[in-house]
Image (cartoon, rainbow, N blue to C red):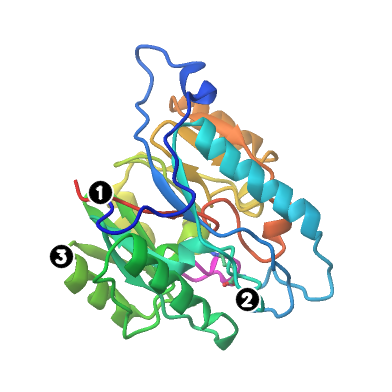
Amino acid sequence: MFPTARPPGFAVASPSPLMTSSAGPASRQVSPRRYLMCPPEHFDVTYAINPWMDPDRPVDRGLVLDQWQQLVTTYRQLGHEVAVLPPAPGLPDMVFAANGGLVVDGRAMGARFRHHERAAEAEHYLAWFRRYLDPAAVAPVHVLEAEGDVLQVGEVLLAGYGFRTDRAAHVEVAAWSGREVVSLELVDPRYYHLDTCLGVLDEQTLAWLPSAFAPEAQAELRRRYPDAIEVDADEAALLAINLVSDGRHVIVPPGATRFRAALEAADFVPIAVDLSELRKAGGGAKCATLELRSAA
Ligand code: ARG
């Protein structure tokens, strides 16, 4: 599956207690995933490029590392593989791996960041892709904050614009991937990346915050996904929609109780992981997790 050297951090999956604990005959199927993550060793809030970030509010470096490790452990217990990209000093947002690239059908496209503060992250992610995943990985011409703004749902790629990613990058991604790209305009600055207001639960099911989208985008999503779960504004504000799902288990913040109940009612299994420190930079589980999607 990996054309070049096997990446550090990948190991043969150990027996997974979380995966086998409650599976019933009618329950949703897990599909094993591969993720790329970057430890928050240099995590900090030293600049403000979204409304969540306040450089005057201190971060707890020990706590953020523990919380991140808990997320990694949870994935591995679920039977998923996690590769780890070494963090670089001076790049406090590098933990947000979803912004580092986009992997579709086993091919990788790097990122181009809107803000100069994050620009240098792109080369680290691109080098990793070229070495471990796709020697032909390309860098985008237009601003593309990668999986933060481009989410695969079944065959289709949903793509956000309005705050970070350029709409022209959507065209670039469509040409590169050969997939349909659906452009969705974001309108609420607190939900500046698509993955903060739209979460992919499985190949046809979403969770979302409708008010974060322009009217045309809302109409498009309602037409395509009539069964999407709407998340309340106060739980969206916990970054609850910034979820990671394997088709059955869904990583959510501990406080999102109504959303958890809605997931259970839809036969998903919510798993609470507290990422309160990452939230100080405007990120949650999905932001910290880049999915390495293989060719079908
Ligand atoms: N501080 C980071 C930024 O504003 C957070 C990125 C969150 N990532 C995401 N995929 N939503 O760029």
Residue 192 is one of the magenta-drawn residues: yes
Could you say which disc has been placed on residue 48 in the image?
none
Front residue of 269 and 21: 21
Taking the spot 28% from the left edge, 76% from the top edge, the residue there is 138
Residue 22 is one of the magenta-drawn residues: no
Whichever of labels 1 and 3 marks the residue nearer the N terminus, that label is: 1
Taking the spot 25% from the left edge, 47% from the top edge, the residue there is 154
Q: Residues within 10 Å of mark 1 (few under 14, many from 20)?
A: few
Number of numbered discs on residues: 3
What whole-number distance in Å separates the C-alpha atoms at marks 2 and 1?
Answer: 30 Å
Front tag of 2 and 1: 1
Front residue of 75 and 255: 75
Provide the residue designation for mark 2.
91
Could you say which disc has been placed on residue 1 in the image?
1
Name the residue type under label 3. Answer: Gly
Contact (Cβ within 8 Å) of mark 2 with mark 3: no
- Quadrant housing residue 72: top right
Q: Is residue 10 above or below residue 176?
A: above
Taking the spot 38% from the left edge, 81% from the top edge, the residue there is 166
Provide the residue designation for mark 3.
178
What whole-number distance in Å separates the C-alpha atoms at marks 1 and 3?
Answer: 20 Å
Name the residue type under label 2. Answer: Leu
Front residue of 55 and 239: 55
Q: Is mark 2 within 8 Å of ligand 1?
A: no
Percent position (x, y) of residue 63?
78, 52
Whichever of labels 2 and 1 marks the residue nearer the N terminus, that label is: 1
Percent position (x, y) of residue 221?
33, 54
- Quadrant housing residue 205: top left
25 left or right, relative to 289: left
262 left or right, relative to 283: left
Percent position (x, y) of residue 84?
51, 55
